[in-house]
Amino acid sequence: MSTDTKTVLLVKYGEISLRKGNRAFYERQIMDTIRRKLSGLSRDIRVRREQGRFLIEDMSGDLDVTAALGRIKYIFGITGFCTCVKTSTRCINDMCTIALNFFLESAGKPRTFKVVTKRSDKSFPLMSRDVSAIIGEKILDGMPTIKVDVHNPETTLWVEIRNNVYFYVNSTIGVGGLPYGSSGKGVLLLSGGLDSPIAGYLTARRGVELHPIYFHSPPFVSERAFDKVRDLSRVLCQYTGRLAVKVVPFTDIQLYLKEHVQEEKLTILLKRAMLMLANAYGLKIGAQCLITGDSIGQVASQTMHSIAAVNSAASLAVIRPLAAMDKQQIVDIAKNIGTFDISIRPYDDCCTLFVAKHPENKPNTTVIERIENKLLAGLEPLIIKALEDAELIDV
């Protein structure tokens, strides 16, 4: 290709374009993340905004799109990536030649096609439909076996006339959402199960910075249980960047509550203790919420009565992104983002080992709080000690 015609990556973003006053803030966050992740790939890579898109190009020539996508495809806030040919020409004849060559190289051998032109630069002398018709005719001349199908084509050639002209045929779908960290901080109560990592992923996708907390109960659970949590966190790191897990020793608290609480009420009191610990950690780091994997009615501890009986243990807001999902929806997301096979490893966490055979599924909040208040003299020192002994482990 000539020096003014080369392969670049056009990056699309979705809902942040509608944010008006906050739009520039979100755009800067995404561009900073792209630049950070592409750091070291090439000294000549540039990332800039161009009329509602981000443009990634190598100033020394064609961009290594495969290498770039491998680093940035999981960035929240991005809805799609388009491998493009960029040209500065404004001559329609040159545009036709470039479009035909690009189509021959990139589209394979489709039986039908259409051309769609978007003309953001209104000073360009031809209307969008005229550009599409002229380029379409050039492709028909160069590919005698292909036909135009404007309703259901096998391949669409997109032409975007902006500060420069861009041609592309396919898009790689991004993960969407809001830029990571743009919506404050949240403490993720992370176990080794299916639900909590998905709750973390969905909340992070809405821009919340994750601070996972894990309750470890040796000798009742093995180190393999924490290995699951570490591996789940590493999957989440693809989307969030570096994570550090707060590992809280929970054995003494579990044993104390098991000794002093009726079996059917034990699960609720254990969950309240976890929320107390997570809440204290959240206040320390300046978090705005706690995040759990609760799904309404999935188990006895997740009925509406149980959720209500647990909530008052925390002063921070408790976010439950899976609340209205069924198990299959959760499994589908887990398989899609890569946590499913890790979550089903046969190593129990502290939650599953201390579940009563017949837990109460309609606990009374007032009764639960009254029981807890009677135990606080013994419980509070254990909570303080657990926080003091907690470790922050990078994953």
Image: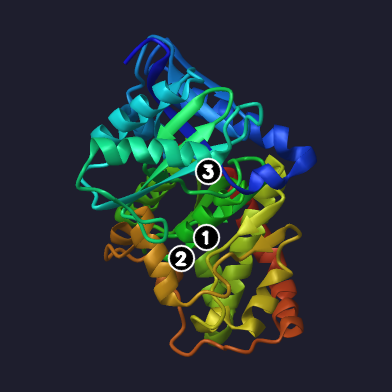
Instruction: Assess disc 2: are there few (<14), some (14-19) or many (≥20) residues with their C-alpha within 10 Å of its C-alpha.
Output: many
Instruction: Assess disc 3: are there few (<14), some (14-19) or many (≥20) residues with their C-alpha within 10 Å of its C-alpha.
Output: few
Q: Do the residues labelled 2 and 3 touch (CB within 8 Å)?
A: no
Q: Position of residue 386 (x, y in %)?
A: 57, 51
Tell me the residue that label 3 is attached to: 129
Tell me the residue that label 2 is attached to: 195
Among numbered discs 2 and 3, the one appearing first in the sequence: 3
Residue in the picture at 65% in, 86% down: 363
Tell me the residue that label 1 is attached to: 199
- Whether residue 140 is visible, yes or no, is yes
Q: Do the residues labelled 2 and 1 touch (CB within 8 Å)?
A: yes
> In the rendered view, would you say 295 is above or below 98?
below
Among numbered discs 1 and 3, the one appearing first in the sequence: 3
Q: Judge from the rendering whether residue 307 lies leftward or rightward of residue 88; answer left or right.
A: right
The quarter in which the N terminus is drawn is top left
Residue in the picture at 40% in, 75% down: 328
| SS for callout 1 | helix
The quarter in which the C terminus is drawn is top left
Amino acid type shown at disc 3? Arg
User: Which label number is shown at residue 322?
Assistant: none
User: Foreground: 92 or 302?
Assistant: 92
Instruction: Assess disc 1: are there few (<14), some (14-19) or many (≥20) residues with their C-alpha within 10 Å of its C-alpha.
Output: many
